[in-house]
Image (cartoon, rainbow, N blue to C red):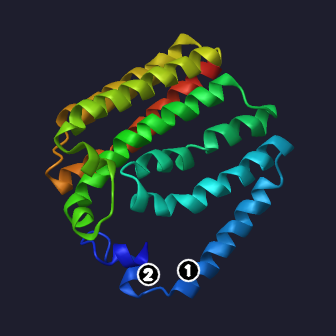
């Protein structure tokens, strides 16, 4: 992405487009990260190793998606949330419904917050020919955000029920869902600063969901 990043105002100062880091240096750093990741992965059980290797195909194809589809956010969600599957198999040794539902909910969540994120760059993206869900949805973004986030909350609820979590799980899920609804209702997609703020606020959603899962197990 270094060439297109260099043509977008928000990303032109990233290490590689700005020239502070060479492509070779970045490749060496990536290889080091992969080595550490592989050391962790191969210490897990067979099912987790298979899943860890399987996701490499998704990772390799993701950077090209913004060039061929208006929905690269979907492929980002497929990648970003894979840890829900590996985390479950690392403990249980197999895939089960709670992990699958958590994964699907995470994909819907990613579709929402990364669409908000993409609105920051939509003018530059349109100029250089890069596609995104922000460009696909345009003025219809808000109702789609409610749809993405509503589906995420419903799938997370289903995951909690499938995992047999105590109802106290809702203490975390309910405010997380409310935060998502606030994002969808209040985001100003024409204001890059507000889009970034709403995007970053998803850290709160993650912490609330984690707190609900932990509480649902402990209590």
Q: Residues within 10 Å of mark 1 (few under 14, many from 20)?
A: few
- Percent x, y of residue 64: 48, 63
Residue drawn 85% across and 44% down?
Answer: 46
Q: Residues within 10 Å of mark 2 (few under 14, many from 20)?
A: many
Q: Secondary structure at mark 1?
A: helix
Residue drawn 33% across and 57% down?
Answer: 131
* Position of residue 103 in the picture relative to residue 46 (left or right): left
Q: CA distance from mark 1 to mark 2?
A: 8 Å
Question: Residue 162, relative to residue 8: is it above or below?
Answer: above
Q: Are marks 1 and 2 in contact (CB under 8 Å)?
A: yes
- Mark number displayed over residue 214: none
Q: Secondary structure at mark 2?
A: helix
Instruction: Judge by depth and name the residue closer to the eye, 136 or 88.
Output: 136
- Percent x, y of residue 68: 42, 58
Residue 165 shows up from this direction: no
Residue drawn 24% across and 57% down?
Answer: 120
- Percent x, y of residue 176: 39, 29
- Which residue carries the number 2 mark? 16
Q: Quadrant of the N terminus?
A: bottom left
Q: Quadrant of the C terminus?
A: top right
Residue drawn 48% across and 31% down?
Answer: 209
- Which residue carries the number 1 mark? 26
């Amino acid at each position: 992405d270094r060439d297109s990043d260099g043509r977008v105002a928000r990303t032109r100062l990233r290490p590689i487009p700005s020239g502070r880091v060479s492509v070779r240096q970045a490749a060496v750093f990536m290889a080091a990260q992969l080595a550490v990741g592989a050391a962790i992965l191969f210490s897990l059980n067979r099912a987790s190793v298979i899943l860890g290797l399987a996701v490499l195909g998704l990772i390799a194809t993701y950077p090209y998606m913004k060039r061929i589809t208006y929905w690269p956010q979907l492929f980002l969600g497929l990648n970003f949330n894979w840890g829900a599957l590996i985390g479950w198999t690392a403990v249980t040794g197999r895939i089960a419904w709670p992990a699958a539902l958590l994964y699907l909910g995470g994909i819907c969540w990613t579709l929402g917050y990364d669409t908000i994120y993409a609105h920051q760059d939509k003018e530059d993206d349109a100029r250089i020919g890069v596609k995104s869900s922000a460009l696909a949805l345009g003025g219809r973004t808000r109702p789609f955000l409610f749809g993405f986030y509503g589906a995420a909350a419903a799938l997370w609820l289903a995951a909690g029920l499938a995992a047999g979590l105590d109802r106290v799980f809702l203490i975390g899920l309910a405010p997380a869902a409310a935060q998502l609804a606030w994002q969808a209702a209040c985001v100003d997609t024409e204001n890059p600063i507000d889009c970034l703020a709403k995007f970053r606020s998803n850290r709160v959603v993650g912490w609330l969901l984690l707190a609900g899962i932990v509480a649902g197990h402990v209590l």
